[in-house]
Image (tube, rainbow, N blue to C red):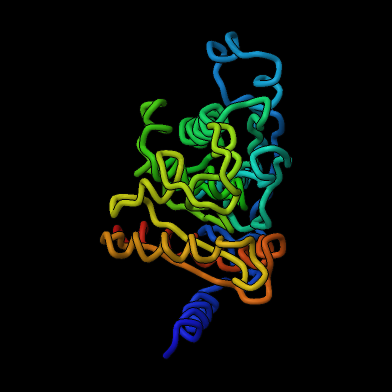
């Protein structure tokens, strides 16, 4: 079996785990759940906001969509893409699955520098972990994910312990990571912000690279990319390297999917099919105590 065939086998294996439309990721049937949305919630506390400028106050907001009246449900915190310079928060296509969704805004370059962008993202995740129980959710079932730049942010938060550590939380408490076409080397915008003048595709692996923080002691991770012929250049290979590196280090739960026929933009839609299966498998393992 060659490499491409092996990838397709893994894709077919994942498809076999997909949920039919009538089945939710939670114990309650979707038809019995009503969903509610709350918008424009500040994820920094009053003390932090008192020191923040107008731009930070404007950007440090999130929206939450949750199954009203449900208990102990999982949550997916989602970060939008846009090269860390643009984009807007949105809910991923995982609605009516018996789980909560959180859409996050964060400061953007060039108004914000690299640390501030990741600090905002970590603060949002910390807010969810500390507050999701008020909505009925389980703080031990919080997944982080995103597309493109958002996948980079979610990977950094989940892999480098210092970002959640600043909130006295552990990255290892996260239920899992869903990275859709994320950069695994140092993000090209972060490189520029830090003064690098090299070509965009010249890889750097420093403290701002998810690869730098590869370890066996990380949450379950699902890496999803489009087809290598039409994806962002080097994106498939970087994620493939991440998957191989994590497995070689002994990480017990790494999933890698190359979705042929989908490019850097359209892979967002295809990735949600895979994400449902990943979330379900992780939650089933938690129920079994694995």
Q: Position of residue 237 (x, y in %)?
A: 50, 65
Residue 25 in which image quadrant: bottom right
Instruction: Tell me if residue 56 comes above or below residue 144 in the rendering.
Output: above
* Residue 213 shown left or right of residue 142 in the figure: left
Extreme bottom residue here?
1
- Along the viewing direction, whichever of 194 and 113 lies nearer the viewer: 194
Residue at point 51%, 36% (across, down): 125
x%, y% of residue 103?
Answer: 65, 41
What is the number of callouts on the image?
Answer: 0
Left or right: residue 190 compared with residue 289: right
* Res. 41 in view: no
Image point (46%, 31%), residue name: 130
Above or below, 282 against 36 in this view is below
Percent coordinates x, y for residue 182 in the rendering: 55, 54
Q: Is residue 244 left or right of residue 130?
A: left
Using the rendered image of the protein, determine whether residue 168 is visible from the camera's viewpoint.
yes
Q: Residue at x 41, y 42 (%)?
A: 206
Q: Quadrant of residue 245?
A: bottom left
Q: Is residue 267 left or right of residue 284?
A: right
The spot of residue 77 in percent (x, y) is: 56, 44
Residue that extends furthest to the left in the rendered view of this protein: 250
Foreground residue among 120 and 13: 120
For the C terminus, give its image quadrant: bottom left
**Up/down of 69 relative to 179, above or below:** above
Quadrant where the N terminus sits is: bottom left
Residue at the image position 70 percent from the left and 29 percent from the top: 40
């Amino acid at each position: 079996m060659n490499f491409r065939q092996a990838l397709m086998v893994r894709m077919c294996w994942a498809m076999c785990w997909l949920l039919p439309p009538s089945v939710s990721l939670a114990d309650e049937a979707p038809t019995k759940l009503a969903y509610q949305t709350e918008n424009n919630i500040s994820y920094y506390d009053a003390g932090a906001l008192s020191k923040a400028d107008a731009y930070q106050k404007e950007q440090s907001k999130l929206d939450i969509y949750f199954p009203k009246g449900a208990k102990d449900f999982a949550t997916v915190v989602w970060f939008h893409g846009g090269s860390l310079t643009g984009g807007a928060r949105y809910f991923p296509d995982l609605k009516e699955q018996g789980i909560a969704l959180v859409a996050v805004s964060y400061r953007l370059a060039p108004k914000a520098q690299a640390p501030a962008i990741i600090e905002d993202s970590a603060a949002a995740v910390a807010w969810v972990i500390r507050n999701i129980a008020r909505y009925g959710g389980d703080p031990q079932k919080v997944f982080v994910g995103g597309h493109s730049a958002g996948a980079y942010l979610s990977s950094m938060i989940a892999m480098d312990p210092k970002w959640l550590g600043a909130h006295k939380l552990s990255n290892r408490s996260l239920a899992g990571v869903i990275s859709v076409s994320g950069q695994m080397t140092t993000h090209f915008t972060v490189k520029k912000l830090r003064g690098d003048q090299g070509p965009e595709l010249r890889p750097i692996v420093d403290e701002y690279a998810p690869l730098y923080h590869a370890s066996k002691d990380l949450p379950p991770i699902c890496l999803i990319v489009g087809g290598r012929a039409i994806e962002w250049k080097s994106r498939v290979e970087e994620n493939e390297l991440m998957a191989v590196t994590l497995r070689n280090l002994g990480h017990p739960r790494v999933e890698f999917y190359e979705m042929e026929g989908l490019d850097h933009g359209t892979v967002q839609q295809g990735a949600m099919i895979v994400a449902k299966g990943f979330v379900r498998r992780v939650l089933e393992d938690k129920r079994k105590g694995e």
